[in-house]
Amino acid sequence: MLILTSQNYHSDEANKQYMSNSQYKDFLACESKAMAKINGWKESAPSVFGVGSYVHAAFEGTLDTYKIEYATEIFNAKGKPYADYAKADDMIRVLKSDPFCMFILQGQKEVIMTAGFAGAVWKIRLDLYAPERSLFADIKTVKSIHDKYWDNDRGYVSFVEAYKYDTQMAIYAEIEKRFSKRQNWYKPLIVAVSKEDVPDKEVIGFDDNDIERELETIAGNMPRIMSVKTGMEEPNRCEKCRFCRESKQLKGITHYLDLQVG
Ligand SMILES: [Zn+2]
Protein backbone atom coordinates (compact mmCIF):
# COMPACT_ATOMS: atom_id res chain seq x y z
CA MET A 1 0.00 0.00 0.00
CA LEU A 2 0.95 3.63 -0.47
CA ILE A 3 3.35 4.93 2.22
CA LEU A 4 1.65 8.05 3.55
CA THR A 5 3.44 11.39 3.92
CA SER A 6 2.16 14.88 4.65
CA GLN A 7 2.39 15.55 0.88
CA ASN A 8 0.26 12.61 -0.30
CA TYR A 9 -1.98 12.24 2.77
CA HIS A 10 -4.99 13.89 1.08
CA SER A 11 -4.26 12.56 -2.43
CA ASP A 12 -6.88 10.68 -4.47
CA GLU A 13 -4.65 7.59 -4.39
CA ALA A 14 -4.42 7.70 -0.57
CA ASN A 15 -8.20 8.09 -0.35
CA LYS A 16 -8.73 5.11 -2.70
CA GLN A 17 -6.47 2.82 -0.66
CA TYR A 18 -7.34 3.99 2.87
CA MET A 19 -10.50 4.76 4.79
CA SER A 20 -10.40 7.98 6.81
CA ASN A 21 -12.60 9.82 9.26
CA SER A 22 -13.68 12.36 6.64
CA GLN A 23 -14.35 9.66 4.03
CA TYR A 24 -16.44 7.72 6.54
CA LYS A 25 -18.49 10.85 7.25
CA ASP A 26 -18.84 11.44 3.49
CA PHE A 27 -20.29 7.95 3.03
CA LEU A 28 -22.81 8.50 5.81
CA ALA A 29 -23.87 11.84 4.32
CA CYS A 30 -24.12 10.72 0.68
CA GLU A 31 -22.60 7.59 -0.87
CA SER A 32 -22.62 9.08 -4.38
CA LYS A 33 -20.76 12.18 -3.24
CA ALA A 34 -18.27 10.06 -1.28
CA MET A 35 -17.51 7.97 -4.40
CA ALA A 36 -17.27 11.10 -6.57
CA LYS A 37 -14.74 12.61 -4.15
CA ILE A 38 -12.64 9.43 -4.18
CA ASN A 39 -12.64 9.71 -7.97
CA GLY A 40 -11.42 13.30 -7.97
CA TRP A 41 -14.59 15.45 -7.68
CA LYS A 42 -13.88 18.49 -5.49
CA GLU A 43 -16.35 19.65 -2.86
CA SER A 44 -15.47 23.35 -2.90
CA ALA A 45 -12.64 25.87 -3.12
CA PRO A 46 -9.79 25.06 -0.70
CA SER A 47 -10.03 28.59 0.73
CA VAL A 48 -13.03 27.43 2.80
CA PHE A 49 -10.54 25.59 5.00
CA GLY A 50 -8.09 28.51 5.02
CA VAL A 51 -8.58 29.81 8.55
CA GLY A 52 -8.61 26.33 10.10
CA SER A 53 -5.42 25.24 8.36
CA TYR A 54 -3.79 28.61 9.16
CA VAL A 55 -4.39 28.03 12.89
CA HIS A 56 -3.17 24.42 12.52
CA ALA A 57 0.00 25.62 10.80
CA ALA A 58 0.70 27.96 13.72
CA PHE A 59 0.72 25.06 16.19
CA GLU A 60 2.58 22.76 13.84
CA GLY A 61 5.32 25.41 13.59
CA THR A 62 4.89 25.87 9.83
CA LEU A 63 3.01 29.19 9.75
CA ASP A 64 5.86 31.10 8.04
CA THR A 65 5.90 28.66 5.11
CA TYR A 66 2.10 28.69 5.03
CA LYS A 67 2.02 32.51 4.81
CA ILE A 68 4.40 32.43 1.84
CA GLU A 69 2.51 29.66 0.06
CA TYR A 70 -0.91 31.32 0.45
CA ALA A 71 0.28 34.95 0.48
CA THR A 72 -2.26 36.19 -2.10
CA GLU A 73 -5.11 34.62 -0.16
CA ILE A 74 -4.00 35.93 3.24
CA PHE A 75 -2.70 39.46 2.49
CA ASN A 76 -4.23 42.39 0.62
CA ALA A 77 -2.27 44.66 -1.75
CA LYS A 78 -1.02 46.72 1.22
CA GLY A 79 0.40 43.61 2.90
CA LYS A 80 -2.24 43.59 5.66
CA PRO A 81 -4.02 40.29 6.42
CA TYR A 82 -7.68 40.03 5.35
CA ALA A 83 -10.24 40.12 8.18
CA ASP A 84 -10.54 36.31 8.40
CA TYR A 85 -6.80 35.92 8.89
CA ALA A 86 -6.52 38.82 11.33
CA LYS A 87 -9.17 36.92 13.29
CA ALA A 88 -7.13 33.72 12.95
CA ASP A 89 -4.13 35.57 14.47
CA ASP A 90 -6.39 36.50 17.42
CA MET A 91 -7.43 32.86 17.80
CA ILE A 92 -3.80 31.73 17.83
CA ARG A 93 -2.96 34.39 20.45
CA VAL A 94 -5.86 33.27 22.64
CA LEU A 95 -4.66 29.64 22.67
CA LYS A 96 -1.00 30.57 23.10
CA SER A 97 -1.73 32.83 26.05
CA ASP A 98 -3.53 30.06 27.94
CA PRO A 99 -1.06 27.95 29.96
CA PHE A 100 -3.38 24.94 30.14
CA CYS A 101 -3.93 24.90 26.35
CA MET A 102 -0.21 25.14 25.77
CA PHE A 103 0.44 22.37 28.30
CA ILE A 104 -1.99 20.12 26.43
CA LEU A 105 -0.50 21.03 23.05
CA GLN A 106 3.05 19.92 23.88
CA GLY A 107 4.19 16.88 21.93
CA GLN A 108 4.63 15.52 18.42
CA LYS A 109 2.76 17.38 15.66
CA GLU A 110 0.88 16.00 12.63
CA VAL A 111 1.57 12.33 13.28
CA ILE A 112 0.29 9.93 10.60
CA MET A 113 -0.76 6.37 11.54
CA THR A 114 -2.51 3.52 9.73
CA ALA A 115 -4.19 0.34 11.00
CA GLY A 116 -6.88 -2.14 10.05
CA PHE A 117 -10.32 -1.80 11.62
CA ALA A 118 -13.82 -2.99 10.62
CA GLY A 119 -12.80 -4.39 7.24
CA ALA A 120 -10.71 -1.43 6.03
CA VAL A 121 -7.23 0.02 6.48
CA TRP A 122 -7.62 3.47 8.01
CA LYS A 123 -5.37 6.51 7.95
CA ILE A 124 -5.35 9.15 10.65
CA ARG A 125 -3.29 12.26 11.22
CA LEU A 126 -3.07 13.48 14.81
CA ASP A 127 -2.61 17.24 15.29
CA LEU A 128 -0.90 16.55 18.59
CA TYR A 129 0.43 13.24 19.90
CA ALA A 130 1.80 12.93 23.44
CA PRO A 131 2.33 9.18 24.14
CA GLU A 132 4.27 9.97 27.33
CA ARG A 133 1.06 11.49 28.69
CA SER A 134 -1.25 8.91 27.03
CA LEU A 135 -3.16 11.53 25.07
CA PHE A 136 -3.69 13.03 21.65
CA ALA A 137 -5.46 16.22 20.68
CA ASP A 138 -7.17 17.80 17.70
CA ILE A 139 -7.46 21.56 17.23
CA LYS A 140 -10.89 22.73 16.07
CA THR A 141 -11.75 26.23 14.93
CA VAL A 142 -15.50 26.73 15.42
CA LYS A 143 -18.04 29.52 14.94
CA SER A 144 -19.01 29.39 18.60
CA ILE A 145 -18.30 26.70 21.18
CA HIS A 146 -21.75 27.05 22.74
CA ASP A 147 -23.98 27.14 19.63
CA LYS A 148 -26.71 24.50 19.44
CA TYR A 149 -27.43 22.48 16.30
CA TRP A 150 -30.49 20.43 15.38
CA ASP A 151 -29.94 16.71 14.83
CA ASN A 152 -32.88 14.63 13.56
CA ASP A 153 -32.04 11.70 15.84
CA ARG A 154 -30.68 13.43 18.92
CA GLY A 155 -32.43 16.82 19.09
CA TYR A 156 -30.28 19.82 19.96
CA VAL A 157 -26.59 18.98 20.14
CA SER A 158 -23.28 20.85 20.45
CA PHE A 159 -20.82 21.41 17.60
CA VAL A 160 -18.99 18.25 18.72
CA GLU A 161 -21.89 15.98 17.77
CA ALA A 162 -23.13 18.17 14.92
CA TYR A 163 -19.80 17.79 13.12
CA LYS A 164 -19.37 14.19 14.34
CA TYR A 165 -16.16 15.02 16.16
CA ASP A 166 -17.10 12.33 18.70
CA THR A 167 -16.92 9.81 15.85
CA GLN A 168 -13.58 11.22 14.72
CA MET A 169 -12.09 10.98 18.22
CA ALA A 170 -13.24 7.34 18.51
CA ILE A 171 -11.65 6.44 15.16
CA TYR A 172 -8.41 8.18 16.13
CA ALA A 173 -8.34 6.45 19.53
CA GLU A 174 -8.89 3.00 17.99
CA ILE A 175 -6.43 3.40 15.10
CA GLU A 176 -3.75 4.80 17.43
CA LYS A 177 -4.31 1.87 19.82
CA ARG A 178 -4.06 -0.72 17.03
CA PHE A 179 -1.09 1.03 15.40
CA SER A 180 0.74 1.05 18.75
CA LYS A 181 -0.38 -2.54 19.53
CA ARG A 182 -1.79 -1.58 22.93
CA GLN A 183 -4.94 -2.70 24.73
CA ASN A 184 -6.16 0.64 26.07
CA TRP A 185 -7.17 3.90 24.40
CA TYR A 186 -5.24 7.09 24.90
CA LYS A 187 -7.29 10.09 25.98
CA PRO A 188 -8.74 12.01 23.00
CA LEU A 189 -8.99 15.78 23.49
CA ILE A 190 -10.40 18.56 21.35
CA VAL A 191 -8.78 21.97 21.76
CA ALA A 192 -11.54 24.26 20.48
CA VAL A 193 -11.19 27.95 19.72
CA SER A 194 -14.06 30.10 18.46
CA LYS A 195 -14.17 32.64 15.64
CA GLU A 196 -16.06 35.19 17.77
CA ASP A 197 -14.84 38.80 18.25
CA VAL A 198 -13.31 37.72 21.51
CA PRO A 199 -12.41 34.08 20.80
CA ASP A 200 -13.60 31.51 23.32
CA LYS A 201 -11.62 28.37 24.09
CA GLU A 202 -12.18 24.98 25.69
CA VAL A 203 -10.35 21.67 26.08
CA ILE A 204 -12.98 18.95 25.58
CA GLY A 205 -12.68 15.32 26.67
CA PHE A 206 -14.37 11.96 26.01
CA ASP A 207 -14.84 8.78 28.06
CA ASP A 208 -14.09 5.18 27.05
CA ASN A 209 -17.87 4.61 26.92
CA ASP A 210 -18.22 7.31 24.26
CA ILE A 211 -15.42 5.73 22.21
CA GLU A 212 -16.91 2.25 22.55
CA ARG A 213 -20.39 3.37 21.48
CA GLU A 214 -19.07 5.22 18.43
CA LEU A 215 -16.87 2.29 17.36
CA GLU A 216 -19.87 -0.07 17.50
CA THR A 217 -21.82 2.24 15.22
CA ILE A 218 -18.89 2.49 12.82
CA ALA A 219 -18.40 -1.28 12.74
CA GLY A 220 -22.11 -1.62 11.91
CA ASN A 221 -21.88 0.83 8.99
CA MET A 222 -18.62 -0.39 7.46
CA PRO A 223 -19.77 -3.52 5.57
CA ARG A 224 -22.14 -1.44 3.40
CA ILE A 225 -19.54 1.33 2.95
CA MET A 226 -16.84 -1.13 1.85
CA SER A 227 -19.12 -2.92 -0.60
CA VAL A 228 -19.96 0.45 -2.21
CA LYS A 229 -16.33 1.59 -2.17
CA THR A 230 -15.14 -1.62 -3.81
CA GLY A 231 -17.88 -1.44 -6.45
CA MET A 232 -19.88 -4.48 -5.30
CA GLU A 233 -22.96 -2.31 -4.64
CA GLU A 234 -24.25 0.87 -6.28
CA PRO A 235 -23.96 4.10 -4.24
CA ASN A 236 -27.21 5.74 -3.09
CA ARG A 237 -27.87 9.39 -3.86
CA CYS A 238 -29.02 11.76 -1.12
CA GLU A 239 -30.51 14.19 -3.72
CA LYS A 240 -29.69 17.14 -1.45
CA CYS A 241 -25.90 17.62 -1.42
CA ARG A 242 -23.91 19.72 -3.86
CA PHE A 243 -22.79 16.70 -5.88
CA CYS A 244 -26.36 15.40 -6.22
CA ARG A 245 -27.65 18.86 -7.15
CA GLU A 246 -24.96 19.15 -9.83
CA SER A 247 -25.89 15.81 -11.35
CA LYS A 248 -29.66 15.90 -10.68
CA GLN A 249 -32.16 15.11 -13.44
CA LEU A 250 -35.83 15.46 -12.63
CA LYS A 251 -38.05 12.50 -13.43
CA GLY A 252 -41.40 14.04 -12.51
CA ILE A 253 -43.39 16.01 -9.96
CA THR A 254 -42.76 15.82 -6.20
CA HIS A 255 -45.76 16.30 -3.90
CA TYR A 256 -45.04 19.07 -1.40
CA LEU A 257 -45.47 16.73 1.56
CA ASP A 258 -42.79 14.42 0.11
CA LEU A 259 -40.09 17.13 0.10
CA GLN A 260 -37.20 16.06 2.30
CA VAL A 261 -36.45 18.65 4.94
CA GLY A 262 -33.73 18.88 7.59
ZN1 LIG B 1 -25.83 13.58 -2.39
Image: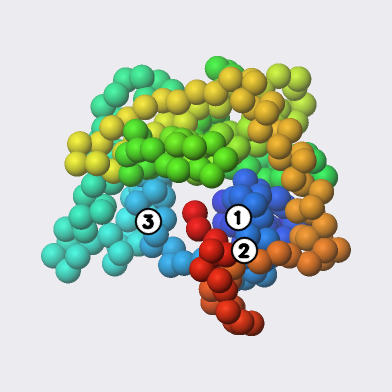
- Residue at 40% in and 21% down: 103
Q: Residue at x 50, y 43 (%)?
A: 151
Nearer the observer: mark 1 or 2; the answer is 2
Q: Is residue 172 visible?
A: no
Helix, strand or loop at disc 2? loop
- Distance of mark 1 from mark 2, alpha carbons? 7 Å
Q: Quick one: quadrant of the N terminus?
A: bottom right
Please name which of the two marks, 1 or 3, marks the residue nearer to the observer: 1
Distance from mark 1 CB to nearest ligand 1 atom below 8 Å: yes
Using the image as rendered, state which of residue 192 and residue 123 is in the foreground.
192
Residue 225 at x, y percent in the picture: 75, 53
Q: Which mark is residue 29?
A: 1
Image mark count: 3
User: Label 3 near label 1: C-beta < 8 Å?
Assistant: no
> For this view, does 148 lie left or right of residue 96?
right
Residue 145 in the figure: left or right of residue 232: left
- The disc labelled 2 sits on which kind of residue? Cys
What residue is shown with label 2? 238
Q: Is residue 184 visible?
A: yes
